[in-house]
Image: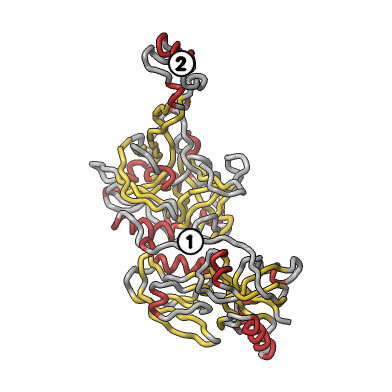
Amino acid sequence: MNRPSSRHFLTASGLALLMALTPAVAQEPATPGADAAQEAANSNQPLTAPDSQARQQQVMPESFADLVEKVSPAVVNITTTSTVSTPLVRGPQLPEGSPFSDLFREFGFPGFPPGEGNPFQRGPQQREQRSNALGSGFVISPDGLIVTNNHVIDGADAIEVEFFSGKRLPAKVIGKDDKTDIAVLKVESSDALPFVKFGDSDRARVGDWVLALGNPLGQGFSASTGIVSARNRALSGTYDDFIQTDAAINRGNSGGPLFNMDGEVIGVNTAILSPNGGSIGIGFSMASNVVSKVVEQLEEYGETRRGWLGVKIQPVTDDIAESLGLAEAKGAMVTDVPAGPAADAGMKAGDVITRFAGGAVEDPRDLVRRVADAPVGEAVEVVVQRDGEPVELKVTLGRRELAEGTGGGKVDSAEESASDLMGMTLAPLTPEIAAELGVSRDMQGLVVQSVEPTGAAADKGLAAGDVITEAGQQPVATLADLETRIKEARDAGRKSILVMVRRAGEPRFVALPVG
């Protein structure tokens, strides 16, 4: 199951396997730690590594055996069964009225009994087959809550969980979140189950030892070790916060835990970067500080309930920071404020969000994650930089899942009196041109007719069909407006001017040089 990426991101998911083709694996003997694990479960205590050993092993572990023995009873294999339909083509397509059609109707055809008529005339038949897929997971409570990847169980008709002891139990889905690829399952057990707890993924450092457990390639319980190779990796999701590791992760490891040396789960193994489908030492685990919050919501509500601020944002680059007179390129720049919580609180396009709920905002990714974690329906303090001064706003967050998306339009050319400015040929936006571009006929601004290939505007990604609606954080409707804004920037000693560019209606800010 490949993630949509030209760089071959693969989910480390359960590869669909025909169980008849899977060689039998001998039952693993019980480990000396099994009794201790059950005692821990009965006392409602999570499985952890001994403190003294954990500290020593973090420096230079002689063996991971004690850690594996301690936490492995909480790691599970997950088998899903689903019904899939495949085209059934059993012969050549025969046209209506063909003499062979009558022949097959009367005498039958291999695979078709007589009297069925011409099945080929109806097109390909569908045949239902049972398909199995494999993945991994881990128990997080003695009463049977299990965490895994959403793609491991998505579309499954039946889910079975196999424990390290060999015990098998059916599982039901409590909730799932496709944005973080996390799912929570539940099994019913008469005995308390061994479980593990989440650790603080923010404390993980590049170079720390980690342990990955799971069911790679359907071979059964398997352990691999490595280090934290990188932090805060993003693949393709809005809420991505991956820990990169060189611990071997393969298909079937999906949903399995990534442990620190204290026996705490700091990540959920989710994807690999590979040109061949196998491990090459670049694996990704969704950070536990993201996962734990999702799990809490799925457990409580059966769905996620993320905060919604109601703004469109972009990074603050060095040149944007310079054009606004900001000391450093940090925060999230607001490009649009549609109807919603932020608009109700008085936020404006061009504001730079520097603080949210009492903490500094580093960049848009940081803001998105923190807004998502904030409680829905509660007022949050947001600080923005506006006209060089901090402005405090109180925003009552909405719920992201209920927010509506936006559409797009097409790019076309414009025909009006034009002028060359900043490496672009610009013309006033008319209602007719706006209709061609797929934007509001009431929009005012300057449409880009052409861009000098070697100019600064081209370097910033501007193209024909873009519409400039603001310059220097003031509306521009005519060429004279833009020229005035450019002169004001030069007179103020600015090297660049901030312009708002809309493409198919979607806004973004760009700093263009005025020298």
Residue 316 appears in view: no
Question: With respect to residue 472, does 467 lie above or below?
Answer: above
Q: Could you give the CA–CA distance between mark 2 and mark 1, rounded to whole angstroms?
A: 50 Å
Question: With respect to residue 493, does 222 lie above or below?
Answer: above
Give how far across and how far down residue 104 sits, in percent. Answer: 44, 13
The answer to which of 314 and 73 lies nearer the viewer is 314
Count of residue discs:
2
Residue placed under numbered mark 2 in the picture? 101
Element under label 1?
Answer: loop
Q: Residues within 10 Å of mark 1 (few under 14, many from 20)?
A: few
Of the image marks 2 and 1, the number of the one nearer the N terminus: 2
Give left or right: position of 401 versus 468: left
Q: Residue furthest right?
A: 454
Judged by depth in the image, the label closer to the viewer, 2 or 1, is 2
At a point 48% along the width and 33% down the height, the residue shown is: 219
At a point 56% along the width and 75% down the height, the residue shown is: 330
Give how far across and how far down residue 259 sits, in percent. Answer: 46, 52
The answer to which of 497 and 56 lies nearer the viewer is 497
At a point 42% along the width and 21% down the height, the residue shown is: 119
Give how far across and how far down residue 344 sits, in percent. Answer: 38, 78
Q: Quadrant of residue 324?
A: bottom right
Q: Residue furthest left?
A: 190
The answer to which of 36 and 336 lies nearer the viewer is 336
Question: With respect to residue 483, does 41 lie above or below?
Answer: above
Q: Give the residue type at disc 2.
A: Ser
At a point 64% along the width and 82% down the height, the residue shown is: 482
Element under label 2?
Answer: helix
Q: Quadrant of residue 31?
A: top left
Q: Which mark is residue 407?
A: 1
Q: Give the residue type at disc 1.
A: Gly
Q: Residues within 10 Å of mark 2 (few under 14, many from 20)?
A: some
Q: Which mark is residue 185?
A: none
